[in-house]
Amino acid sequence: MYPAIQTTRQTVLVGSSLRQAYHRLYLQLCRTYTSRNVLKLNERGLWADRFPDSNTNKLIEELTRQPQTVYSGFDPTADSLHVGNLLVLIALLHCQRAGHNIIALVGGATAQVGDPSGRSSERPQLKIDEIKANSIKISENIRQIFENHKQIFWDQGNDEPLPTLRIENNLHWYKRLNVVDFLRDAGRNLRMGDMLSRTSVQSRLSAPEGLSFTEFSYQALQAYDWLYLYDMYNCKFQIGGNDQMGNIYTGHQLIHRVRKTSVTGLTIPIITNESGDKFGKSAGNPIWLDSSKTSPFDLYQFFVRIKDSEVEKYLHLLTFLPVKDIKQVMEKHWGKPESRYAQKKLAEKVTLLVHGRRGLESARRTSEVLYGNQSEALAEMTRDEIQVVFNSYPSVELILTPGTSVLDLALKAQCFKDERDARRIIEAGGFYINLSRVSNPDLILVPGAHILPNGLSLLRVGKKNYYLIKWQK
């Protein structure tokens, strides 16, 4: 090779290598956390407590020396997770972003027992087939959220790929374990005094209904889950809600006695609504993570309605925005708080994580229809989206016959008490078809103008009385 050409080639290669190195450095700087020390997440308010809380330096050394295995459990007591579970998933994702191995444990066995934590009475017993079906659905929830995070929030050009999510079901080992073996291997290492001292146990023992042995044994099963995962995957970290500290402590004690080693429990704060009640399904306020139970629009609006006094906290807890970016979001928000800029940023990030890009687009289209009065956005909505959003409003199936007028449509949809009332309100400008005002009751319906491409028409009387028309062919 000629010297000049060789020198040029070396210069290009060196320049290319430097650019790649700078690009890798930039990507690392863009990550919320480059350190494996997930205790730094304290600055976001993510950790409520940890056990044991001594020897922090040793724990940091363990976290940073090599990737650890972290797990959280999810009992399939319903066919979807809810926003009360979201922070646990966010915590697991932060650990995954830091390079640690993640296990999501679905409690196909423990759901048959029932966790008494936070309960004033025993949970209704679920059928085995129902728990199996719920386990599948919850696994899908978890897998989808981790996949959305990977595709949307993690730069694919990063040199360090995300560790693979592992989903386990504790039914797999309990169905092979008989009660004698369990009592011999685990039961002899659990102390009744400690188990009876748990807050969840004490509150139930003093209640009129009391506490069944089945529920009392739940903490023993959760402890054995951790022991099993420790033996199989060297899992030394468990994450749970702050109300799970007693159960996590029982697992710590079991592993310490049986394996002569120390493990760590990390708890997260319990997400509550404005009244201090849990967002979860037990509190009667279910905001589900499955789109068939709570639409992307409803999830989006749930976070848009967060109070100004709380939105900064939730930006820290439920998004991956760097702390400095959250500060900038709040500065812009306080410049014009009525625009709800911070709430919309929060709603955007959570909806992207839970439902992906298509879910966010659907939520925004629906918001434009309901609050922006944009007929173009309505025409872009799918039939399923419209039916989900307006499922609580009256609907009727009709066949379009030649010569059908606006008045005919309004009466068939039972928008008015009688024809006289219908004419009066329509002529006064109080009647809308597909968000467009129609003031001529004798106007003949025209497909394309009055019927959407998806075969639906949305009627509105006044400001908020909607009627959905499903046209039959």
Image: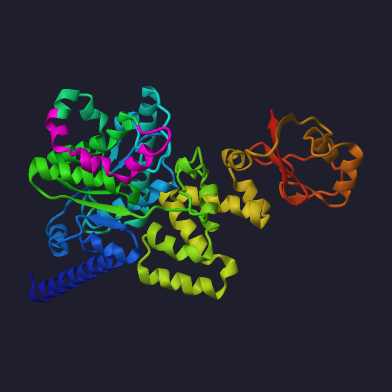
Say whether residue 267 is magenta: no
Vertical comparison of 71 with 67: above or below:
above
Say whether residue 208 is magenta: yes
Would residue 241 be found to the left or right of residue 296 on screen?
Answer: left
The residue positioned 48% from the left and 41% from the top of the image is 291
Which quadrant of the view contains residue 404?
top right
Q: Which residues are magenta?
A: 184-211
Of 128 and 246, which appears nearest the observer? 246
Residue 46 in the image: state x and y as whole percent. 33, 59
- In the rendered image, the quadrant that contains the N terminus is bottom left
Residue 200 in the image: state x and y as whole percent. 34, 43
Which quadrant of the view contains residue 129?
top left
Of 406 and 223, which appears nearest the observer? 223
Of 289 and 11, which appears nearest the observer? 289
Would residue 419 be found to the left or right of residue 461 on screen?
Answer: right
- In the rendered image, the quadrant that contains the C terminus is top right
Vertical comparison of 324 with 37: above or below:
below
Could you tell me if residue 287 is visible in this image? yes
Which quadrant of the view contains residue 314?
bottom left
Residue 99 in the image: state x and y as whole percent. 21, 55
Vertical comparison of 126 with 277: above or below:
above
Would residue 53 be found to the left or right of residue 4 on screen?
Answer: right
Would you say the magenta stretch is mainly helix, strand or loop? Answer: helix
